[in-house]
Amino acid sequence: MVLPVRDSREAQPARGCETCGRLDHDRRDARNRGDHSAATDRSGLIRRHPVH
């Protein structure tokens, strides 16, 4: 079973942050591969990134 992603609650990458941009790219790639666990992991890393 795959749960839907709630875009309104999803971690947003900080503008201009290379690390957040890379994590966001990786998250999209993971979703496209069907690896929802990896996508969730990237969201957590974006949320906890020190720039925020």
Image: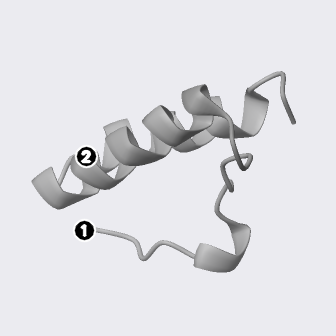
Q: Is residue 23 left or right of residue 51?
A: left
> As displayed, is residue 27 above or below residue 28?
above
Mark 1 residue type = Met
Where does the image place residue 31, in percent across and percent down from the top left?
A: 26, 56
Q: Secondary structure at mark 2?
A: helix
Name the one closer to the observer, 4 or 28: 28
Q: Secondary structure at mark 1?
A: loop
Q: Is residue 28 left or right of residue 42?
A: left
Q: Residue 1 got which mark?
A: 1
Where does the image place residue 8, in percent across and percent down from the top left?
A: 70, 78
Label 2 Cα crowd, 10 Å radius (few <14 / some 14-19 / many 20+)? some
Quadrant including the N terminus: bottom left
Where does the image place residue 38, in percent across and percent down from the top left?
A: 34, 37
Seen at 71% across and 68% down, the residue is 9
Which quadrant of the structure image shows residue 48? top right
Residue found at the far left of this picture = 33
User: What is the spatial separation of the Cα atoms under label 2 and label 1, in whole angstroms?
Assistant: 17 Å
> As displayed, is residue 20 above or below residue 10?
above
Where does the image place residue 33, in percent across and percent down from the top left?
A: 12, 52
Q: Residue 30 got which mark?
A: 2
Name the one closer to the observer, 16 or 50: 16
Which comes before the other along the chain, label 2 or label 1?
1
Q: Residue 21 got which mark?
A: none
**Do callouts 2 and 1 mark residues in contact (Cβ within 8 Å)?**
no
